[in-house]
């Protein structure tokens, strides 16, 4: 088991600003626990070298006290120790109490506590975990914030151990002093309560700052339309409604109850509802996907923590706060979204399901409303005009008609890089063996001590097909949306186009594991096929989705190819391994689907993946086509501070569809910050939310999972 530990002390000081790591001194072992101890060298200590040999005893004692005082000040604070290795047999299980006892024992050994009762002062304020990296490890990676009683530094041996620590990114780091204390609802209620009641400043630096920064100044409720009920739309609606806006949430799809029935009709009877499917509907595309909460915008950033705690508030299991790779699953997302909806309605939010935005109402270069229609009505003239003070556009990456509508209204759009490829499926037991070796038998379909194995691979391939080692020198080829214990599902929104994705339920108990293997493409690839303009990426997607539909023979049958066959143009093999895709598969020559440079990049990267994961290339592996909707093909430029469109006043593009997020969490975080930005622009309050939730990541639309 590999532990990543943050050791905390009360009273924070920045003490290692001038330290540097020299080299690992040695590895010391204590009771099946080993940790790399590092030394630090400080120039100020070097200058005191002649003080260590004073001419008289008095000066020596005074110098010793001074040096000890300096050392104490330098080590006081919250620290993160990483790469602490605990032997696997000490416990792979998920019992947090057992884990705490193991870590307490580690603290005793490494810091050499002389008074054991001090352990009673140790408490863990945060425990994050994920599976151990590396084949056969079978461990769990822990990230911890702890608070240790200040008296531990009074012992000389403990002090000596701690002073060997030196700041090194990814190994030993300072931890933040303050972070969000609750979910988004609690945060908003706290500072509203302070402003309304004019209470005295609280002891916490964070709370006292709230009183000074946030003053609600609006006497009028602005009318705001939020278009799209995915993560960004839901969180923007939540913030705006909590701050007093009159919010109307417009969703072209259906609530999760009816959406589930529509998806069932698609899977069982091949009946595709154009406005209610795997892409459109309450919760967005992520609802009937894997429910991943993994993000690359800062796992422990305050915005991400606030989002995760808010999901827990609405019914998500608390383990998403501690898991290194949190995952909900579709079965848990459905009741969570129902609770979210009920809370919004309790705040007075009007939710209009089955309502599509067909056009914007623009006056004097400012959007003043939208034209909508009922998606379940067959009447072409069934349009309605709705007036609003602002439009928050939170659509998903498959809302191609919305992009076209924006383009016709002269809203600035720019083509954005995204990735395309194929989805590969293996037996889950094979992935378990690759990752866990002899521990694979302990997985037990997610019920054993060892969780279901997953993988993540990234390579950069140059034009010669060799490892380029960096994004600048080659194409990025990587696994995307890996679904252990999952299934391949249809994400088409048009019967003449074929697109797939993966999904898992919370237990991940399926016998298959699937992941997309994709290659990054840019405007150069669009241009080579004759697709130009801001919507060129959409035309690129459509072209290869149509080709895949033809290869499958129609009726949503997916073309597949044995994993090994992609390496050559051998004769077509009719006999293929079984697939989790429920609408049928057909053997096809997928190596002829994409342009040669994309196919060759896939071929070469798969070979590299196999070297990293021996057994990845297997007779049991099956490639499915196609995966094209990894992220939005366009970006809608906006002001980085106000979130308002740079080309149309009153329009606020947010989330994945606007090109500013990739995945559930980053979309939710973008919606959160956008909600505050819109509220500030409409005089709902004045202040700076970044002082509480930190600065949002910019241009996150290029990052997925």
Image: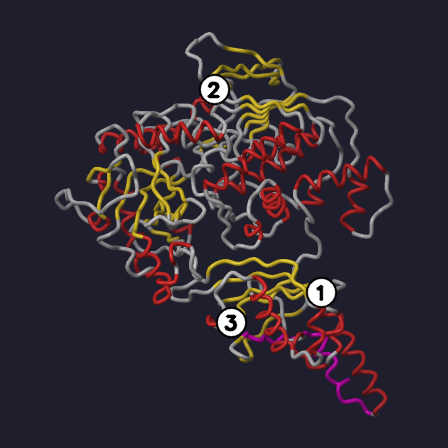
* Mark 1 nearby-residue class (10 Å; few <14, some 14–19, many ≥20): many
Mark 2 and mark 1 lie on one chain; the one further toward the N terminus is 1
Question: Which label sits in the foreground, 3 or 2?
Answer: 3
Residues in magenta, as a range: 35-55
Residue under the point 39% across and 56% down: 453
- Residue 264 appears anywhere in the view: yes
Q: Is residue 293 magenta?
A: no
At mark 1, the secondary structure is loop
Query: Is 598 or 342 nearer to us in this picture?
Result: 342
Mark linked to residue 412: none
* Residue highlighted by disc 1: 77
Residue 594 horizontal/vertical position (percent): 27, 38
Residue underneath mark 2:
405
**How much space separates mark 3 and mark 2, taking CA atoms?**
57 Å
Q: Is residue 28 left or right of residue 187?
A: left
Q: Quadrant of residue 399?
A: top left
Is there CB contact under 8 Å for labels 3 and 2?
no
Instruction: Indicate left or right for 498 with 634 as reference.
Output: left
- Image position, residue 165 (x, y; %): 63, 72
Residue 50 is inside the magenta segment? yes
Distance of label 2 from label 1 (alpha carbons): 54 Å
Q: Are marks 2 and 1 in contact (CB under 8 Å)?
A: no
**Is 621 placed above or below 274 here?**
below
On the image, the x and y values in percent for residue 305 come to 61, 48
Q: What crowding class fits label 3: few (fewer than 14 Cα within 10 Å), some (14-19), or many (20 or more)? A: many
Q: Secondary structure at mark 3?
A: strand
The colour scheme of the drawn protein is: secondary structure
Image spot of residue 299 (x, y percent): 56, 51
Mark identifier at residue 86: 3
């Amino acid at each position: 088991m590999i532990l990543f530990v943050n050791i905390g002390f009360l009273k924070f000081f920045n003490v290692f600003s001038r330290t540097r790591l020299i080299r690992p001194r040695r590895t010391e072992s204590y009771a099946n626990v080993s940790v790399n101890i590092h030394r630090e060298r400080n120039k100020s200590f070097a200058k005191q070298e002649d003080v260590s040999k004073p001419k008289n005893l008095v000066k020596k004692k005074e110098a010793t006290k001074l040096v000890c005082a300096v050392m104490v000040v330098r080590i006081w604070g919250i620290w993160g120790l990483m790469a602490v290795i605990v032997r696997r047999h000490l416990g792979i299980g998920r019992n947090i109490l057992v884990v705490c006892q193991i870590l307490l024992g580690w603290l005793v050994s490494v810091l050499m506590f002389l008074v054991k009762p001090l352990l009673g002062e140790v408490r863990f304020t945060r425990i994050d975990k994920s599976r151990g990296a590396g084949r056969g490890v079978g461990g769990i990676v822990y990230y911890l914030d702890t608070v240790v009683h200040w008296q531990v530094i009074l012992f000389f041996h403990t002090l000596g151990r701690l002073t060997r620590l030196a700041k090194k990114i990814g190994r030993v780091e300072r931890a933040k002093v303050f972070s969000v204390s609750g979910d988004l609802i609690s945060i908003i209620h706290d500072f509203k309560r302070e402003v309304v009641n004019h209470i005295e400043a609280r002891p916490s630096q964070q709370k006292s700052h709230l009183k000074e920064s946030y003053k609600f100044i609006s006497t009028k409720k602005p009318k705001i339309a939020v278009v799209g009920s995915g993560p960004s739309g839901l969180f923007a609606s939540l913030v705006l409604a909590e701050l007093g806006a009159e919010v109307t949430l417009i969703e072209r799809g259906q609530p999760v109850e009816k959406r589930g029935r529509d998806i069932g009709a698609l899977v069982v009877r091949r009946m595709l509802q154009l406005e209610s499917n795997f892409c459109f509907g309450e919760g967005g595309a992520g609802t009937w996907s894997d429910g991943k909460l993994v993000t690359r915008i800062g796992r422990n950033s305050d915005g991400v923590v606030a989002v995760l705690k808010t999901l827990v508030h609405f019914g998500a299991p608390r383990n998403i706060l501690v898991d290194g790779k949190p995952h909900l699953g579709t079965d848990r997302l459905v009741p969570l979204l129902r609770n979210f909806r009920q809370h919004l309605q309790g705040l007075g939010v009007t939710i209009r399901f089955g309502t599509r935005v067909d056009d914007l109402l623009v006056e004097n270069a400012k959007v003043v409303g939208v034209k909508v229609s009922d998606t379940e009505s067959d009447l072409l003239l069934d349009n309605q005009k709705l007036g609003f003070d602002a439009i928050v556009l939170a659509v998903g990456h498959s809302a191609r008609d919305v992009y076209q509508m924006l383009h016709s209204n002269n809203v600035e759009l720019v083509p954005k890089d995204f990735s395309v490829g194929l989805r590969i499926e293996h037996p889950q037991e094979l992935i378990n063996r690759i990752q866990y070796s002899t521990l694979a038998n302990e997985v037990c379909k997610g019920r054993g001590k060892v969780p279901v194995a997953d993988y993540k691979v990234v390579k950069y391939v140059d034009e010669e097909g060799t490892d380029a080692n960096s994004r600048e020198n080659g194409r990025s080829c990587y696994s995307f949306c890996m679904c252990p214990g999952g299934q391949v599902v249809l994400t088409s929104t048009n019967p003449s186009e074929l697109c797939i994705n993966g999904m898992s339920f919370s237990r991940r108990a399926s016998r298959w594991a699937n992941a997309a293997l994709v290659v990054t493409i840019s405007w150069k690839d669009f241009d080579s096929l004759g697709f130009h303009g801001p919507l060129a990426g959409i035309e690129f997607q459509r072209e290869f989705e149509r080709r895949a539909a033809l290869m499958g023979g129609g009726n949503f049958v997916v073309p597949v190819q044995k994993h090994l066959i992609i390496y050559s143009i051998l004769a077509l093999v009719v006999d293929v391994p079984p697939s989790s895709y429920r609408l049928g598969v057909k053997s096809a020559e997928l190596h002829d689907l994409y342009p040669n440079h994309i196919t060759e990049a896939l071929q070469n990267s798969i070979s590299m993946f196999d070297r990293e994961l021996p057994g990845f290339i297997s007779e049991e592996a099956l490639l499915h086509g196609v995966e094209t909707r990894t992220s939005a093909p366009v970006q809608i430029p906006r002001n980085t501070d106000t979130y308002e469109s740079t080309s149309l006043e009153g329009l606020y593009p947010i989330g994945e569809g606007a090109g500013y997020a990739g995945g559930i969490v980053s979309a939710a975080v973008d919606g959160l910050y956008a909600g505050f930005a819109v509220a500030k622009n409409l005089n709902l309050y004045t202040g700076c939310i970044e002082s509480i939730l930190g600065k949002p990541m910019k241009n996150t639309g290029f990052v997925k999972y």
